[in-house]
Image (cartoon, grey):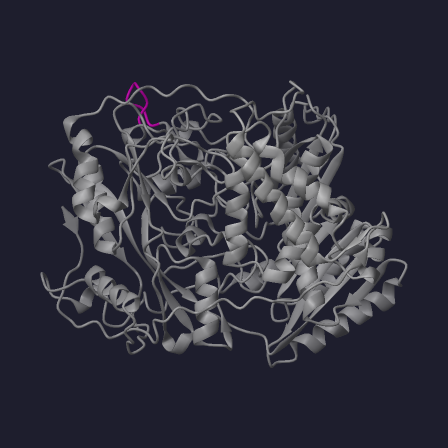
């Protein structure tokens, strides 16, 4: 049964033009520059060489036999994915997964794919087998997580999503909600078992409850309300697509996400479900209390009941606007989405004056929170505040969300600031960046010396590509081409592209201007900072604080370089953006292992967590050959990429570092991209999820929860409380 308010009140037409906006990207080109080895080559020529090399890889793959993709060195060898990260990833354990138990399907489960095809059409239901090429993008995670499913279903309307959900739960199957499948902790793909210890085995399927992946990506309509101050997004709307649309509709406004993993185009719904944040200090993490989402429970007769929760707060489609049996919010939103796709224009809607219509559509208190100098962290995934859709990690099915847009700065200035020591950099954060909640910079991104050296030594090709074509959809297609080549059946395919990129690096111009390159090689800590002017003197006040800080400390402690134009600003952005990808390339080029971990440190902290032997903690870690630390400096969310010699047990090293972060540095993990199968959620977070999903039909096993029906173990006990390590 479906429990949803239905009605007759006409939907007050929502939105303006439905035409697709084209994302604006910077198109600065680089001139030929001398390398440290004396060889020179222009960026276009280097990029052409990269393309030729990738094509060569394809040809080799097509003509080669299957082979072992690992190096001849038989010692354990773990590599990072190289995915650009906004926060919170760490490499999976090298331990092998156990073989899944063959599902014992009921007749209703065997018939489910056919029933789903009758709802969404035959082209929108795929096999759940990993052996099918068309299914692999939905079954294998961007960094970790891989498993089979009974089926993959791609609803084209909200109503289809609800109908599919009803059929899935009635067949006693579980649901793995999925956006663009760009998650980093294994929570957005089915799991066959053998995970890292959460719940029973972290499996989203059990022999009696097979999983179905519900890909929401095709629900990709978005439209503005409230004169552009807010936007409504169906669950599949990509953050890059939304950024382009808002810029087209309202040039003086911008969406929440305008940097970070843009070319991967993750969905806005996933951002809410995982609390994504990243580079935009003034905006805080993705959050909204205005949403449309589905929950599942059973009535007293044992029938599965889907409840549609409507907190969108849009005038004309509140639950109270409808009469029983005469329309619904689902129907009206689907009509609008159809109109958008067919190119119709609609009168823009507005928020209602109800409690929902005045609720938060972003983290409005974040500037106050982040600028308060205390021992708490700015943001983390186990936060239990807000409407259930927030940080739900797949425990409800998000259908649509309302988000604030933000004023675009009238103009801005970007600076590269280099520091002699970390203490000076931390003082800069307190006294210049976080002085008060009204004058926060647009972004403040930190890199240490190892990060600088690795990006310059292995990230030039990708960085120059971003400078030329931007970080939008074209870059996304090139990244997909890289992943495709790495999956080809020839010996060395997984490493081929990174070897090419590493060998081309010294022929490619440096990303940064010479004066900044010199600072990078003489100082060990660096910040790329953008300050905007919003019509209230923000920029002038920030520059006054900066000038005073430099005067008080002297140029032997701090050096400041202002970008002279858009090209240099793009260079700084690209240099920071390619750090994770450059780390993988560096590891491949130097024959090292690599792991990644992300965490939030207290706002009044920032000291580097200890490595090596620590008797007080009972930990022992081998020292890495490279330790990259780069962070969203304002909110103190840190990424670490650590390179080790082959043969080192990097999983143990990762666990020891996690322990150091949590118990010595008082930090929190994960900070942004979800618990997935990597982290056990705290008890309060687990209890919140169990309340959202009492039957455990959504994303079972996430965050250390049980995978069993109603979270029971084999003896009928609740497993959720036992797994909050």
In this view of the protein, can residue 633 be seen by the observer?
no
Q: Where is residue 564 in the image (x, y as percent from the top left)?
A: 75, 72
Question: Is 557 located above or below residue 201 in the figure?
Answer: below
Which of the two residues, 41 or 81, is positioned nearer the viewer here?
Answer: 41
**Any magenta on residue 715?**
yes
Q: In this view, does 54 lie to the left or right of 725?
A: right
Q: Where is residue 85 in the image (x, y as percent from the top left)?
A: 57, 47
Question: Is 136 located above or below residue 421 in the figure?
Answer: above
Question: Is 10 located above or below residue 597 in the figure?
Answer: below
Q: Position of residue 84 (x, y in %)?
A: 58, 48
In the image, the segment drawn in magenta is 712-718
Name the quadrant containing residue 549. bottom right
Kindly report the secondary structure that dominates the magenta region of the rendered protein. loop
Name the quadrant containing residue 545. bottom right
Name the quadrant containing residue 138. top left
Question: Is 174 located above or below residue 673 in the figure?
Answer: above
């Amino acid at each position: 049964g479906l429990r949803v308010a239905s009605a007759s009140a006409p939907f007050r037409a929502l939105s303006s033009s439905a035409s697709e906006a084209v994302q604006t990207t910077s198109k600065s080109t680089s001139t030929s520059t001398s390398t440290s080895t004396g060889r020179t080559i222009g960026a276009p020529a280097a990029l052409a060489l990269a393309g030729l090399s990738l094509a060569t890889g394809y040809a080799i793959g097509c003509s080669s036999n299957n082979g072992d993709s690992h190096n001849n060195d038989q010692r354990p060898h773990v590599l990072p994915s190289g995915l650009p990260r906004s926060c919170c990833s760490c490499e999976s354990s090298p331990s092998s997964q156990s073989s899944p138990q063959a599902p014992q399907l009921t007749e209703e489960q065997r018939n489910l794919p056919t029933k789903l095809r009758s709802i969404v059409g035959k082209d929108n239901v795929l096999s759940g087998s990993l052996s099918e090429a068309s299914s692999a993008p939905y079954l294998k995670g961007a960094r970790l997580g891989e498993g089979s499913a009974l089926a993959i279903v791609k609803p084209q309307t909200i109503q289809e999503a609800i109908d599919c959900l009803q059929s899935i739960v009635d067949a006693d199957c579980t649901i793995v909600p999925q956006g663009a499948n760009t998650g980093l902790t294994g929570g957005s793909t089915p799991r066959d078992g053998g995970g890292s210890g959460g719940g029973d085995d972290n499996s989203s399927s059990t022999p009696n409850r097979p999983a179905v992946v519900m890909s929401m990506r095709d629900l990709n309509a978005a439209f503005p309300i409230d004169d552009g101050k807010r936007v409504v997004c169906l669950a599949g709307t990509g953050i890059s697509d939304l950024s382009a649309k808002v810029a087209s509709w309202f040039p003086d406004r911008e969406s929440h996400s305008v940097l970070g993993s843009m070319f991967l185009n993750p969905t806005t719904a996933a951002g809410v479900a995982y609390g994504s944040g990243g580079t935009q200090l003034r905006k805080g993490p993705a959050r909204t209390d205005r949403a449309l989402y589905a929950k599942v429970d059973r009535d007293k007769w044992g029938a599965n009941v889907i409840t549609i929760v409507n907190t969108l707060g849009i005038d004309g489609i509140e639950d109270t606007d409808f009469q029983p049996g005469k329309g619904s919010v689902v129907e009206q939103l689907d009509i609008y989405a159809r109109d958008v796709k067919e190119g119709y224009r609609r009168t823009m809607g507005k928020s209602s004056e109800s409690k929902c219509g005045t609720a938060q559509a972003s983290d409005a208190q974040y500037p106050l929170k982040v600028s308060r100098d205390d021992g708490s962290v700015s943001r983390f995934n186990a936060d239990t505040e807000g409407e259930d859709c927030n940080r739900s990690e797949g425990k409800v099915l998000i259908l649509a969300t309302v988000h604030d847009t933000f004023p675009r700065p009238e103009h801005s200035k970007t600076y590269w600031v280099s520091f002699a020591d970390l203490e000076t950099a931390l003082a800069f954060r307190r006294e210049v960046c976080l002085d008060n909640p009204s004058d926060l910079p647009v972004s403040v991104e930190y890199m240490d010396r190892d990060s600088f050296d690795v990006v310059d030594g292995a990230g030039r090709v990708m960085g120059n590509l971003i400078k030329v074509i931007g970080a939008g959809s074209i870059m996304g297609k090139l990244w997909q081409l890289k992943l495709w080549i790495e999956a080809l059946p020839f010996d060395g395919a997984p490493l081929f592209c990174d070897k090419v990129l590493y060998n081309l690096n010294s022929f490619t111009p440096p990303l940064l201007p010479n004066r900044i390159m010199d600072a990078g090689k003489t100082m060990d800590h660096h910040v790329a900072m953008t300050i905007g002017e919003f019509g209230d003197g923000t920029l002038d006040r920030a520059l006054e604080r900066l000038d005073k800080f430099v005067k008080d400390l002297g140029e032997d402690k701090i050096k400041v370089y202002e970008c002279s134009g858009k090209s240099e600003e793009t260079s700084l952005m690209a240099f920071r953006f390619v750090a994770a990808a450059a780390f993988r390339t560096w590891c491949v080029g130097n024959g090292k292992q690599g792991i990644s971990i992300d965490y939030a440190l207290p706002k009044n902290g920032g000291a580097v967590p200890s490595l090596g032997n620590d008797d007080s903690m009972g930990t022992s870690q081998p020292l890495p050959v490279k330790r990259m630390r780069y962070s969203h400096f304002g909110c103190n969310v840190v990424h670490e990429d650590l390179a080790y010699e082959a043969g080192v047990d990097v999983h143990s090293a990762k666990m020891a570092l996690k322990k150091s972060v949590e118990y010595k540095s008082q930090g929190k993990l994960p900070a942004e991209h979800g618990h997935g199968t990597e982290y056990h959620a705290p008890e309060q977070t687990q209890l919140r999820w169990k309340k959202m999903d009492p039957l455990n039909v959504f994303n079972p096993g996430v965050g250390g929860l049980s995978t069993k029906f109603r979270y029971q173990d084999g003896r009928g006990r609740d497993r959720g409380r036992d797994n909050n390590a």
